[in-house]
Amino acid sequence: MSTLLRTSAVLVEDASPGLSMTTMLDGIVRQVYRKDSGFTVLQIETKVAEEDQDYLVITAVGRTPELPRVGHRYTLTGQWTTHSKYGKQFHIESLTKPLPTTSAGIEVYLASGIFPGVGPVLAKRMVQKFGDLTLDVMRTQPQRLLEVSGVGPAALTKMMSEAMGQLGLVSTVSDLCRLGLTQAQAARTLQTFGTDGYPMIRDNPYRLVDVWGMGFRKADAVAKRLNILPDDARRLHAAIKCILDSQGSQGRVCTPIAVLLSRLADLCDLDVTVLERCVDDWIKRRWIVREDDYVLAPAMVEVQRLIEDTFGYVIRRPALRETEVSLNASSQRLTREQCLAVKRALAYPLSLIVGSDGVGLSLCLRAIVDEVKQRDLKLCVAAPTAALASFLDDDDQPCAVPWDDFHEYQRNGQQGPLKDVEVLIVVNAEQLDFVRAAHVLKTFDRERIRIVLVGDDQEVPLSDPGHVFRACLQVGMFPVTRITQVVKSQKDSGRISLIRQICDGDMPKWVSGLFGQDCLLYMVKSLEEERQALSGLLDRLSFTPKEIQVVAIGPKGPLGTIWLNRWFQDRWNAQASPQLMGFRIGDPVRSVRRNHEKEVRVMEEGEIQMIDPHSASMCVVFSGREVTYQEWECDELILAYALTIRQAQVVRKPCAVVILPPQPCDWLTRERLLTALRVGTQYLVLVGTPRTCKATVRNTLGEERTLWFVRYKEASDEHTR
């Protein structure tokens, strides 16, 4: 047993109200049994009491956030219980991993980004100098770090200001885990609130709703441990915030008061009169804004007013007549509709171009860019991702700015160069929500900017409130050019034909077979047939796995992305090992969260290059950049063999395989189906039942997203008059 690390068992008496005496055990995992539900049974080799001379193997049971690994040391927090059948067991409340002790683990830990100024290169030098004692040196003799090349006095001070807190976080993580958080949740809490996270959460556990990956249910469970009453104001306020955030994530700008009260009653299990008083109190304090029978967050009012004021100001600026705009020779080859779009883009301070697939939008936009360059005007192209500005030449690519970067420019005070931009082209404008639109518009000088919004009015933002493009069309104040003529190269495309029929509300013949040369319909009658169709389907496709994107309606269910990702992983990457949190070397992944420290964007595509089971970390390559993820950070990544429609909105691959559920559902509308179909740029496969396809084409989205934009616009116009 000499190879075992030092273990200890202590009784910790917590002073928190509502918490009983808790036992902590340190030990080595010898066997693991885990159910799909997350319930885990462990055989732990440990000392049950500090004075014990021998190590015992005990049984520990409970739900753990990740699968513990055999041979690894963990700290368990919980209580001893007696099972009627299995006898004495240790019930796990939390399971944490201590700081790394090997050189390899310490190097990955230091390079993870939590220490200012320490990256992979400097972390390697520090470990080469001090080996397994690196963390001890940082804790007890930090001045010795000056012996490492690249560490100066200023860098040391900056590094150690964070290191003293980080190296003492093990006890803080343990404190948070005793409140009912998992290790990953505790790490996220500390990442959000810093080293003061534990006292902040004990004071108000509903602050947890501000931590990425946690919601009201988790905060409520922690609050119950702290004996917070059900009608506590902090609880009700957190519930209101979560409901409004949830409505926003579904694309709704405002929430009917009746819906808010109904959701509150379900969430808080309280009398409606109590909830009405709470909502009235929030309205009086201006924490939420009431308009007629609706409520919305003050921030949503502000962003809408900013958009309206900016558009209203821009549109009142002088414009040229379309006949006064002359185009160069290359633009003369465009269709009549495309030429009109180019002229209006150059003549008006704000114009809209509406077009679907196959009408030559890229050609039209390329002509606008050429005309702008010929006039020596400074250009910026705003797109969901830089890759979606595909109409730009390599020389013009620096002009493309992803939408989310505009917020970063403002936050870091870097928008100065963009103030001189004279022409702004917003592509995929149908996906632009109110908040991102406000960030984009704030960046530019409205005295000189000329705005061109380009999009398809048949698509909408899927996960954020507000639909700027559709609202502008409804207001009717701006010049709109609709491009409907299909270019010659796309006239025989079955993929384009199917998309256009669905756009027009027409009902294609839902029968299996080729739909043109680049579209395959796979119509089935049941779930079993749909699953069986996948195997034969893949054999018919000539694309590589990296060229195929599978799209499903959601993550759960028998044909959800969770099941599909495992199925495709076993088919396309079955031999890869080792594994970490379900990931394998060679798996395609996407980030579901913007990580500023790692410089990873939302839905950025990467591939797992290396997994180190000893340090419980993996290396992911994003656009040639190697990024390290610790085990507790793996929830920022998802397997990307299959994506939901929301996740795939900004994804473009040569081949898209769209899998619809056997039964229709209210959420799946014509607009969302079109979003999925447009993922494939060369070939499209649609798998589903005729019943679901027909119902989806008939099911269109309402006007709820734009109600408030129009209402405020009318009020603004009335005030102007």
Image (cartoon, rainbow, N blue to C red):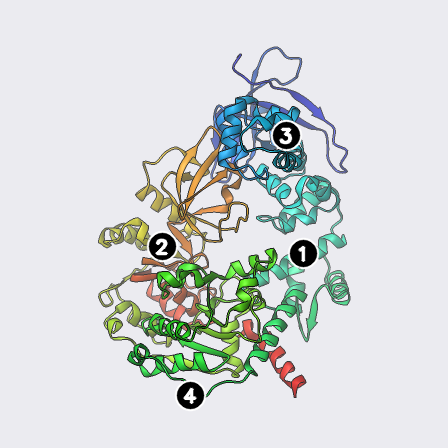
Rendered image: mark on residue 644: none
- In this orientation, which residue lies closer to the viewer: 598 or 413? 413
Locate residue 77, reporting x and y percent.
63, 30
Pointer 4 or 1: first along the chain: 1
Locate residue 659, reporting x and y percent.
36, 58
Q: Amino acid at mark 4?
A: Glu
User: In the rendered image, which residue does mark 1 sit on?
Assistant: 239
Q: CA distance from mark 2 to mark 4?
A: 48 Å
* Position above or below: 91 against 539: above
State yes or no: discs 4 and 1 in contact (Cβ < 8 Å).
no
Q: Residues within 10 Å of mark 3 (few under 14, many from 20)?
A: many
Rendered image: mark on residue 324: 4
387 sits left or right of 278 in the view: left
Q: CA distance from mark 1 to mark 2?
A: 35 Å
Q: Residues within 10 Å of mark 1 (few under 14, many from 20)?
A: many
User: In the rendered image, which residue does mark 3 sit on?
Assistant: 77
Q: CA distance from mark 4 to mark 1?
A: 57 Å
